[in-house]
Amino acid sequence: MWKLTLAGVFCLVLLTVALGAQALTPSHHLSLSDVDRLKGLLSQPFTDLASAYYSIVGLSKLGASVADENDACQFLKAQLDPMSVDSLFFAAEASQAIADCEMPVFNETRDILLAAVSEDSTVTQIFRAVSALSSLGLPLASQEVVAALVARIAKEDNVLAITTALQTATRLSQQAELGGILEEIEDLAARLDDLGGVYLQFEEGLEATALFVTAAYTLSDHADTEPPLKEDQVIQLVNSVFSKKSWDSRSEAFSVACAAAALSSNRFHVPVIVSTQGPATVSHSQPILHLLVTDILSNPLASANLLVESAQAVASKSVVLSQAPFSLRNGIFELNFMASQPASGYYQFTVAVTGDSRLVANQVELKVKVSTEVAVTNMDLSVVDKDQSIGTKTSRVDYPFKAKGSFTADSHQNFAMNFQLVDANTGVELTPHQTFVRFHNQKTGQEVVFVAEPDSKNLYKFELDTAERKSEFDSMSGTYVLHLIVGDATLENPILWNVADVVLKFLDEEAPAAIQSKTLYMPKPDIQHLFREPEKKPPTVVSNTFTALVLSPFLLLLILWFKLGANISNFSLSPSSVLFHVGHACMLGLMYVYWTHLNMFQTLKYLAIIGSLTFLAGNRMLAQKAVKRLASK
Amino acid sequence: MSNSVISVISRFLEEYTTKTSNKLKVVDAYLFYILLTGALQFLYCLLVGTFPFNSFLAGFILCVGAFILGVCLRIQINPDNKGDFLSISQERAFADFLLAHTVLHLVVINFIG
């Protein structure tokens, strides 16, 4: 039962490892030219102790040294100010990097440096004092330093301060209580910003990130504890620190140099870079794939073995190679891939670097191209009659020669071309991306391109129906030069082959009008804007007649009323009735004015005024009338 | 057949001239005038075309509306219908007629363009 569970757990672990195999790989590192540029920046002449420190110590981290070491040593001694902690720090550290360079130590030096180690100095001051003490070989009390650091971290909670505290801890004795400070690495790592899953950096910038990397790994080595950084985080930090290839200041270059040194030679995580030497292409003439395995400073790794875990064809997904080791020659790993006789195309390689348990990102995916040469075989040209479909004239043409006679095709005939494309080395049939048939009329400059397509047996066929395609040729009869164009990314020898001359005869040949493109770009005729035409109105006579006609019933009305005996004899001249009639007339007049001048709002305003007056007057008048009527009843 | 139609019409005319009061005849004359005006407008539209359509509509709607209001007035002041309109006196009917006409005129003048 225990064996079963153990096997189960093992399988689960293997599965997670397999799934996690799609890990991140570094997209940036320092190539040899980058390292030279970095060294160049650091080798610039220095003018003060700080720049001297950056240059001397930075170059030593990269394995180089300043131009004239004696001069540098003299410079340090001359510039040293024994009363300043900073000055002592720069001089002491720099002199450590130069062989046979000793700084003079005065009696007061030790006191000044020890005085700086207290809760009241900044972390930078403590760091510089501790470093100077340790470089000058003076004794210091590690536990006091730890206490001071812990107190300062609580007060100065920024990234640079904590990084400096980590650096300080690397100079202390291993017996001191460094646990609390070691935990700061993890807290600080949590403050990093993840950019797109590719970069991990502090918002304070490149220098802060690089200094953090240096401090974390130096302290981890010193305390012999693995840093709490995951593999992906390490790769993301590598990307952030080494993506910038030209540095603004000496201190930035110094921080990058320190980070590079820390990442290439610490005891826990060493990121490995696998790169191709030249383009990742193999062919029959160059069958060997060359790979370089280096650390981030582009130094070849001492004890590394490279293995192809699998090589899979991208198109067919078949695995061509599995678990094949590379052989090492002159520091370059080689594999003869053509020995596995791969077909031409692209292959996805998964390679693994083994040999050192510290290696990080040691599984890399590469795309390798296998190219080949193409040969055109069995090229047959023929002119076929449409109704008979018997070839009247089939001729075989060999590459790179041209057909001897020319081929004539008129509207009753088709011009046909059959050929095969094979791999020149293996004889396998190929289907390249570009197989074009180009007709070029030398006289008119016309060019018509068609695509030749393979059938199910990978035989290429091209047929030109003269009548059907006449629009593409603009019905221009004449001699056309025929070219075959074959191309592909995996072909080393693209083909442009003048196969034959073809004379095409079209029906209803249009007059040789100038090539359409000439008139295409001339100004076109102006477009005159057609304004909206007013509607057709009837003649004025008609409308005037009808106006009179429409108004005439009013006369009829007056006549009828007169005949009925309607009169205004009962009209009482009381003020209300006068006012009413006047108001009413005003309202009718307002209607006319509304039609000619006013808008609705103005009309409503006037109507309200006149209307209310008329209403009141009318009310009074009608009441009086009602009374009169009832009284007379 | 035509005989009965003619006799009906002549009987109707006779009753109308004798039985209807003068007041109502005045209103009837007014209604006849409105009718004529509307018909003539419509005739013009048929003959000459509908341009401008909004003016034609305004004029025609005015005639139709005025006719309807006239008919309402006639119904309300007819003494035979007094039983149906107990709360509305003749003056009140006339006042309503005037008010409705004001609104109608406002709308029509707005629309006539």
Image (cartoon, rainbow, N blue to C red):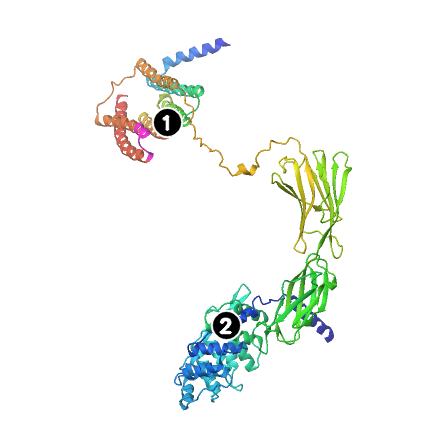
> Left or right: where does residue A330 sit relative to residue B82?
right
**Residue A35 image label:** none
Quadrant in the picture for the N terminus of chain A: bottom right
Q: Considering the numbered disc 2 on the image, is that residue within a helix, a strand or a loop?
A: helix
Name the kind of residue labelled 2 in the image: Gly
Q: Secondary structure at mark 1?
A: loop
Q: Name the foreground residue: B108 vs A362.
A: A362
Q: Chain of mark 2?
A: A
Q: Amino acid at mark 1?
A: Phe
Count all numbered tags in the image, as a single digit. 2
Q: Main secondary structure of the magenta part?
A: helix
For disc 2, the marked residue is A40
**x then y, percent, for residue B11:** 42, 11
| Side of B67 relative to A612 (left or right) | right
Q: Position of residue A484 (x, y in %)?
A: 68, 46
Question: Percent from the top left, x then y, of residue B108?
Answer: 37, 28
Residue B85 is marked as 1
Q: Residue, x 71% and y 73% (percent of image)?
A: A5
Residue farthest to the bottom, as pictured: A107
Q: Is residue B87 above or below residue A65?
A: above
A550 relative to A139 in the view: left or right:
left
- A466 is within the stretch colored magenta: no
Q: Nearer the viewer, residue A2 or A400?
A: A400
Segment colored magenta: A591-600
CA gap, disc 2 and disc 1: 115 Å
Foreground mark, 2 or 1?
2
Q: Is the residue marked by circle 2 packed among few (<14), some (14-19), or many (20+) residues within 10 Å?
A: few
Q: Against A449, is B61 above or below? A: above
Residue at the top extreme, as displayed: B3
Q: Which image quarter: residue A602? A: top left
A371 in relation to A18, above or below: above
Q: Chain of mark 1?
A: B
